[in-house]
Image (tube, helix red, strand yellow):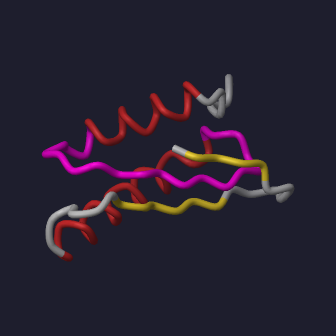
Amino acid sequence: MIYVSNGLAFNRFAVALVRKYGNSVERNKSKRILREIYRESKDSYISGFDFVIVLYPGNFTFIERKKQLYSLMKRGDLVKIS
């Protein structure tokens, strides 16, 4: 995950994939899943940042990807305490 302050009142979120991440169907599905995970939980993250998440291939479930994203955000001190 790469993040930088953007000086805005909201976050911007992007997903990047490593090379050779399967076919286009797998790539698009993985990006859609991660965007949905972020959309569901964006209120629990601190505002004012640009995020780029780099996805690596793997057979992860929705719940596992959600835990991975939360762990990354927590590691970057981007989770609201409330």
Query: Residue 47 at x, y = what percent?
Result: 74, 47
Q: Please check the rendered image and state whether residue 57 is part of the magenta-colored stretch, yes or no.
A: yes
**The C terminus sits in image quarter:** top right
- Which image quadrant for residue 80? top right
Query: Residue 30 at x, y = what percent?
Result: 27, 60
What residue is rendered at 54% in x and 55% in y?
Answer: 52
Q: In the drawing, does residue 71 fall left or right of residue 29?
A: right
Q: In the drawing, does residue 37 fall left or right of residue 27?
A: right
Q: Nearer the viewer, residue 28 or 10?
A: 28
Outermost residue to the front? 19
What residue is rendered at 55% in x and 34% in y?
Answer: 73
- Which image quadrant for residue 68? top left
Q: Nearer the viewer, residue 22 or 39?
A: 22
Q: Nearer the viewer, residue 17 or 72?
A: 17
What residue is rendered at 55% in x and 25% in y?
Answer: 75
Q: How many marks?
A: 0
Q: Please check the rendered image and state whether residue 7 is part of the magenta-colored stretch, yes or no.
A: no
- Determine whether 76 is above or below 5 in the image: above
Query: Residue 37 at x, y = what percent?
Result: 40, 51
What residue is rendered at 22% in x and 61% in y?
Answer: 21
Magenta segment boundaries in residue numbering: 44-63
Outermost residue to the right? 7
Query: Residue 12 at x, y = what percent?
Result: 64, 61
Q: In the drawing, does residue 61 fall left or right of residue 76?
A: left
